[in-house]
């Protein structure tokens, strides 16, 4: 039920702005909200433009830096079924504290110099692991630029691997 509220009718009589009430999910109420939204867009073009630019920048950033990710379950499947290679880009100290079985330790800072070590493995899936899954994206891009395909980053990194209670080797 929509219409002028009791206070709205009194306000209209007194020359003030009326209060129009409506049931929260009625079609008329949604129509009023949409009308207010369209009015807001028309009254604030600079603000709307800023929001659209920010949204476009976020989309562009994710498109540019986005890489294929593999969950811990997908990683186990790739290792078991496709003989995937795990490249751990953490420092030697972190690597020795615990890493995935048969993982290669190529620290992120030395990846460019040591990328040739993986050339004989082209064609096999490569999974890049780091501590939290945030640094692996750059390494994935570097490996893809060298012609390795497919290359995945371990989503959540070794932190997620350990949280899932998956096996790690310590030295």
Image (spheres, rainbow, N blue to C red):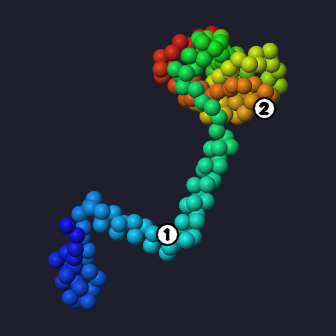
* Mark earlier in primary sequence (1, 2): 1
Question: In the orientation shown, which residue stands out farthest toward the front?
Answer: 27
Q: Which mark is residue 41?
A: 1
Quarter-of-image position of residue 154: top right
Vertically, is 30 above or below 14? above
Q: Residue at x 61, y 49 (%)?
A: 59
Alpha carbon separation for disc pair 1 and 2: 43 Å
Q: Which mark is residue 145?
A: 2
Residue 9 in sight: yes
Q: Is residue 129 left or right of residue 6?
A: right
Residue 109 at x, y = what percent? 75, 29
Image quarter of the N terminus: bottom left
Q: Nearer the viewer, residue 71 or 130?
A: 71
Quarter-of-image position of residue 168: top right
Q: Residue at x 79, y 23 (%)?
A: 115
Q: Secondary structure at mark 2?
A: helix
Q: Nearer the viewer, residue 128 or 90?
A: 128
Task: Check whether the beta carbons of the residues at disc 1 and disc 2 lie within 8 A of each other.
Answer: no
Q: Residue at x 57, y 60 (%)?
A: 52
Residue 108 at x, y = what percent? 72, 28
Vertically, is 82 above or below 19? above
Q: Residues within 10 Å of mark 2 (few under 14, many from 20)?
A: few
């Amino acid at each position: 039920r929509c219409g002028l509220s009791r206070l709205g009718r009194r306000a209209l009589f007194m020359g003030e702005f009326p209060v129009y009430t409506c049931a929260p999910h009625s079609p008329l109420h949604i129509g009023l909200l949409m009308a207010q939204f369209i009015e807001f867009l028309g009254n604030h073009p600079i603000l709307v433009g800023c929001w659209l630019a920010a949204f476009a920048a976020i989309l562009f950033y994710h498109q540019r830096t986005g890489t294929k990710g593999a969950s811990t379950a997908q990683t186990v499947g790739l290792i078991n079924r496709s003989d995937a290679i795990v490249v751990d880009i953490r420092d030697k100290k972190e690597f020795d504290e615990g890493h995935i079985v048969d993982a290669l330790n190529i620290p992120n800072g030395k990846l460019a110099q040591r990328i040739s070590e993986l050339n004989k493995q082209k064609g096999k899936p490569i999974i890049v692991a780091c501590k939290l899954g945030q640094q692996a994206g750059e390494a994935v891009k570097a490996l893809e630029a060298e012609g390795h395909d497919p290359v995945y980053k371990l989503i959540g990194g070794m932190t997620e691997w350990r949280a899932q209670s998956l096996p790690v080797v310590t030295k």
